[in-house]
Image (spheres, rainbow, N blue to C red):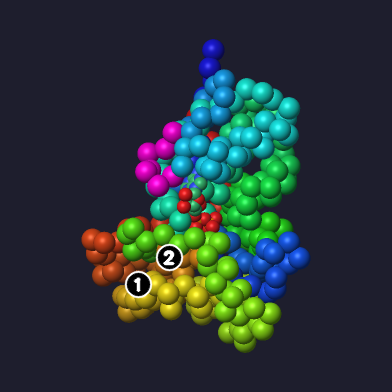
Amino acid sequence: MSKAITLQCFAKINLFLEIVGLRPDRFHEVVMVLQSIDLADTVQITTHREIAIRCDHTQVPTNEENIAYQAAQVMQKALGRKDGALIEIGKKIPVAAGLAGGSANAAAVLVGLNLLWDAGLTVRELEKLAQALGSDVPFCVDGGTSLAVGRGEILSPLLSFKGIPLVLAKTQNLGISTAWAYKTYREQYGEAKPVHASNLPILLSGLVHHDLARITKHLYNDLERVVLPEHPAVAYLKQRMSEAGASGVMMSGSGPSVFGLCANENQARSVLSKISQEDQEQFLCHTSDAGVVVCS
Ligand code: ATP
């Protein structure tokens, strides 16, 4: 008899992203503050002869290129299993948007197969397996608020910063490849590191004290330096969100998503109504402390 499990996996935003060097393996050394938000995909996993993917979003591959497929392969290998899983993904998280949607799906497969196959791996063991799949996948397993260094896979959990309203928006039909953003950054800045306007200690102290004014003043993302000149629509969206009254506005990851942290629900609703337009996806969300949640 087949067994099934349904999970929700949450998107992330970057409150902070600074590139601090290039590693010998050609990945960038980064310092990030990652934050889960309550915008989630649904992943249903059913026991199956082989690995198979179904997805309701046309831009998402359903073969080995899907990172959720690769996550199932990683679990097969780690646990020495030959059977597979049917993985059905319901997309709410915009694709190629700097929100780690694919990484979240992969994290859901790690958590889901661990339960479905009664493997008993701990969260730390799943995060370790997640490292092989991508820099954001370890964070997506447990979610919440974390300082991430290395390629982004070395995590230090921070105090919960749950429940802050935010408006999230992206221009429709605009996707940005993370690989392109980092490559362009490397080409433009190379070894000569630009002078940074970032101040991580103040952001971290803001997070410890839940001081939204301090946090919003010190949001930071190095990748804006390459994405904004290439995609004026992202710069324009940032400007509109600031003018609409969001307390702190920043691009997430390699974009094109832009988020605006708000002081309260009313402010968030007002920002959302002022920036809404047809050629744009927009959401009212909240910061969350969940990575992957089992629904049934
Ligand atoms: P990150 O912030 O982790 O770099 P992202 O949010 O910018 O990721 P994704 O939504 O993960 O980007 O998608 C990046 C690309 O990966 C897409 O263009 C898509 O073709 C491919 N992809 C593979 N698997 C998935 C998946 N499960 N969901 C979404 N995209 C996927």
Residue 96 image point, x, y percent = 46, 56
Query: How far is the residue under mark 1 from the one under mark 2?
Result: 9 Å
**Direction bottom: furthest residue:** 195
Part of the protein shown in magenta:
54-60
**Direction right: furthest residue:** 24
Q: Residues within 10 Å of mark 1 (few under 14, many from 20)?
A: some
Disc 2 is placed on an element classified as loop
Q: Residue at x 69, y 64 (%)?
A: 26
Question: Is 47 drawn above or below residue 34 in the view shown?
Answer: above
Q: Amino acid at mark 1?
A: Ala
- The residue labelled by disc 1 is 233
Q: Is residue 56 magenta?
A: yes
- 250 or 65, which lies in front? 65
Q: Does residue 254 appear to the left or right of 76 in the view shown?
A: left
On the question of residue 143 being in view, the answer is: yes
- 209 or 155, which lies in front? 155
Q: Earlier in the sequence, mark 1 or mark 2?
A: 1
- 154 or 120, which lies in front? 154
On the question of residue 292 being in view, the answer is: no
Question: Is 227 drawn above or below residue 58 in the view shown?
Answer: below
Point out which mark residue 131 bears.
Answer: none
Residue 146 image point, x, y percent = 63, 60
Point out which mark residue 256 bears.
Answer: 2
Q: Are marks 1 and 2 in contact (CB under 8 Å)?
A: yes
Question: Is 100 drawn above or below residue 240 in the view shown?
Answer: above
Report if the beta carbon of the residue with label 1 is closer than 8 angstroms to ligand 1. no
